[in-house]
C-alpha cells in the first residue's frame, strides 16, 4: 500500500531481457536501505526488489509480460527517470490517498500549460475500460497522488506545484508521454456497485 507521495526519482541504468520478463536495474541513493522481497512503487507500479548492490546504490526489479502490457514500463529506456515510493508505514500521517500500486491503464499526455507558478497537465485515456474521474477526486499519475481538476469522459487534467515538478518525473512530461494511471479505489468500488445495480435492474 502506498500514499502517492513520491520520495525521489531513480534512474534506469540497465535493462536485461529474459524470455518474456524484463529486469530493470535502478539507481537511487537510498538503495542501501532496501531489502530483498520489499515492494516499491515505480511510476505507480508495485514491483518486488529481487537484487541489491549496496556499493553501487542499485537494485533490480522484474516486470512480467502482463505488467509490460498494462503499464508504461515497456517504454522505459536507459537513463529514464522513474518515480519511487517505498510502501507506507502505519505509524505516521497519511498525506496522500490510498494507492495500491496496481496500475489500471495508461494515459497519454495531450497538453501541458505553464500557468506562471504551476503547471496544468491534460491526459487522455481509453474510456472503454470503464474507469472514471470526477472533479476534485483523487488519481495517481505515475505514482503521484493528485487531485483531478478537469474531468470529461476519457480525459482529465491535474495541476502541479513547483515542488512536485522538481521532485517527480513530471518535469520530463511532454505531449505524447505515456503515463501509468491508478484510479481512486473508492471510486472504482462505487462504479462497480452501480454497474451491478443496473445489470440487476435489467433482469
Image (cartoon, helix red, strand yellow):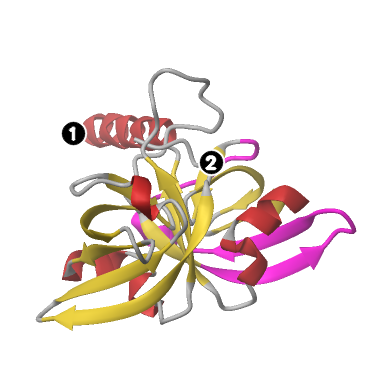
Describe residue 51's horizontal placement relative to residue 55 as left or right: left
Instruction: Please say if the residues under marks 1 and 2 sit with CB atoms less than 8 Å apart.
Output: no
Q: Nearer the viewer, residue 13 or 146?
A: 13
Crowd rating for badge 2 (residues with CA inside 10 Å; few <14, some 14–19, many 20+):
many
Q: Nearer the viewer, residue 106 or 202?
A: 106
Q: Residue furthest top?
A: 91
Residue tagged by mark 1? 203
Quick one: quadrant of the N terminus? top left
- Give how far apart the Cα atoms at labels 1 and 2 are: 44 Å
Tag 1 secondary structure: loop
Tag 2 secondary structure: loop
| Relative image position of residue 19 (x, y in whole percent) | 9, 81
Residue lying at 34% horizontally and 65% vertically, measured from the top left:
71
Residue lying at 53% horizontally and 20% vertically, measured from the top left:
93
Residue 182 on the magenta segment: no
Please identify the quarter of the rendering in which residue 100 is found: top left
Q: Residue furthest right?
A: 116
Please identify the quarter of the rendering in which residue 75 is found: bottom left
Q: Is residue 102 visible to the viewer in this orientation of the structure?
A: yes
Residue lying at 45% horizontally and 38% vertically, measured from the top left:
184
Write the start and end of the magenta stretch as one range: 108-136
Q: Is residue 158 visible to the viewer in this orientation of the structure?
A: no
| Relative image position of residue 163 (x, y in whole percent) | 72, 49
Residue tagged by mark 2? 5
Earlier sequence position, callout 1 versus callout 2: 2
| Relative image position of residue 56 (x, y in whole percent) | 37, 66
Amino acid at each position: 500500500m502506498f500514499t502517492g507521495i513520491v520520495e525521489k526519482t531513480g534512474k534506469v541504468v540497465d535493462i536485461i531481457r529474459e524470455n518474456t520478463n524484463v529486469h530493470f536495474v535502478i539507481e537511487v541513493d537510498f538503495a542501501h536501505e532496501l531489502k530483498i522481497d520489499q515492494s516499491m512503487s515505480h511510476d505507480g507500479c508495485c514491483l518486488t526488489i529481487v537484487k541489491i548492490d549496496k556499493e553501487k546504490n542499485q537494485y533490480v526489479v522484474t516486470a512480467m509480460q502482463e505488467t509490460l502490457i498494462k503499464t508504461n514500463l515497456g517504454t522505459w529506456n536507459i537513463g529514464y527517470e522513474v518515480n519511487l515510493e517505498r510502501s507506507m508505514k502505519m505509524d505516521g500521517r497519511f498525506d496522500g490517498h490510498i494507492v495500491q500500486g496496481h496500475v489500471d491503464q495508461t494515459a497519454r499526455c495531450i497538453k501541458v500549460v505553464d500557468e506562471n507558478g504551476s503547471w496544468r497537465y491534460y491526459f487522455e485515456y481509453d474510456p472503454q475500460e470503464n474507469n472514471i474521474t470526477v472533479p476534485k477526486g483523487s488519481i495517481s499519475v505515475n505514482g503521484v497522488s493528485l487531485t483531478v481538476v478537469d474531468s470529461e469522459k476519457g480525459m482529465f487534467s491535474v495541476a502541479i506545484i513547483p515542488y512536485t515538478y522538481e521532485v517527480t518525473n513530471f518535469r520530463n512530461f511532454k505531449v505524447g508521454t505515456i503515463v501509468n494511471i491508478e484510479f481512486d479505489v473508492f471510486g472504482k468500488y462505487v462504479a462497480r456497485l452501480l454497474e451491478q445495480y443496473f445489470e440487476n435492474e435489467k433482469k
